[in-house]
C-alpha cells in the first residue's frame, strides 16, 4: 500500500526549483494524476517519478499567470514574505496573512 504525505499544504507559497515561477498550492494529488500525454511531454531526463505528491498551483512568473502541476521534488517553500498576484486567488483564498493564504471555504 502506498502511503504518501504531502510536504506542502493548501495556501502555502512555493517556488519551482529549476524554472522561474512561484505559486500558491490549491490542491494536492497523493501521486501523479494527470494525463500520460502530459507526462510524456516532459523530457525523459527531467521526468519526475509518478510515486510522489503533485501540486496544483496558482502560478505566476514575470510575464503571466497560469495554473501549474508540479511534482514535490521540483518545489521548494517560498519564505520571501511576498504575496502572489494571481487574479484567481480571491476565488479560493482570503487575504495574504503571515506568509500564507487562508482558505475561503470549508473542505469536506
Image (cartoon, helix red, strand yellow):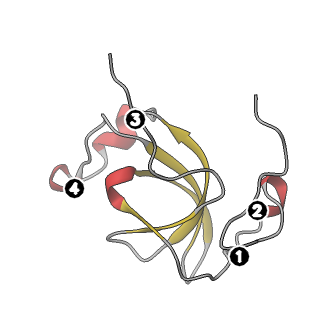
* Residue identified by numbered label 4: 46
> Mark 1 near mark 4, Cβ–Cβ under 8 Å?
no
Badge 2 vs badge 3, beta-carbon distance below 8 Å:
no
Label disc, if present, on residue 32 of the rendered structure:
3
Residue at point 57%, 56% (across, down):
57
Say whether residue 52 is left or right of residue 55: left
Q: What is the CA distance from the residue labelled 4 to the residue labelled 2?
A: 29 Å
Q: Earlier in the sequence, mark 3 or mark 1?
A: 3
- The disc label shown at residue 85, or none: 1
Mark toward the start of the polypeptide (1 vs 4): 4
For the question of whether residue 88 can be seen, the reply is: no
Local secondary structure at mark 4: helix
For the residues labelled 1 and 4, the Cα–Cα distance comes to 28 Å
Q: CA distance from mark 2 to mark 1?
A: 8 Å
Given the current orientation, which residue lies at the most extreme front position? Answer: 98
Q: Position of residue 91 (x, y in %)?
A: 83, 55
Element type at mark 3: loop
Mark sitting on residue 96: none
Q: Residue at x 54, y 41 (%)?
A: 28
Circle 4 or circle 2, nearest the eye: 2
From the viewer's side, name the closer residue of 21 and 82. Answer: 82
Residue at far top of view = 1
Q: Secondary structure at mark 2?
A: helix
Q: The N terminus appears in which quarter of the rendering?
A: top left
Find disc 2 in the rendering and name its residue.
89
Amino acid at each position: 500500500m502506498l502511503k504518501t504525505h504531502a510536504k506542502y499544504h493548501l495556501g502555502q507559497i512555493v517556488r519551482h526549483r529549476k524554472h522561474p515561477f512561484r505559486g500558491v498550492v490549491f490542491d494536492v494529488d497523493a501521486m501523479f494524476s494527470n494525463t500520460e500525454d502530459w507526462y510524456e511531454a516532459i523530457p525523459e531526463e527531467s521526468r519526475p517519478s509518478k510515486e510522489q505528491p503533485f501540486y496544483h498551483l496558482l502560478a505566476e512568473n514575470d510575464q503571466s499567470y497560469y495554473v501549474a502541476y508540479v511534482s514535490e521534488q521540483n518545489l521548494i517553500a517560498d519564505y520571501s514574505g511576498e504575496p502572489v498576484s494571481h487574479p484567481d486567488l480571491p476565488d479560493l483564498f482570503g487575504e495574504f496573512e503571515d506568509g500564507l493564504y487562508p482558505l475561503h471555504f470549508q473542505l469536506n
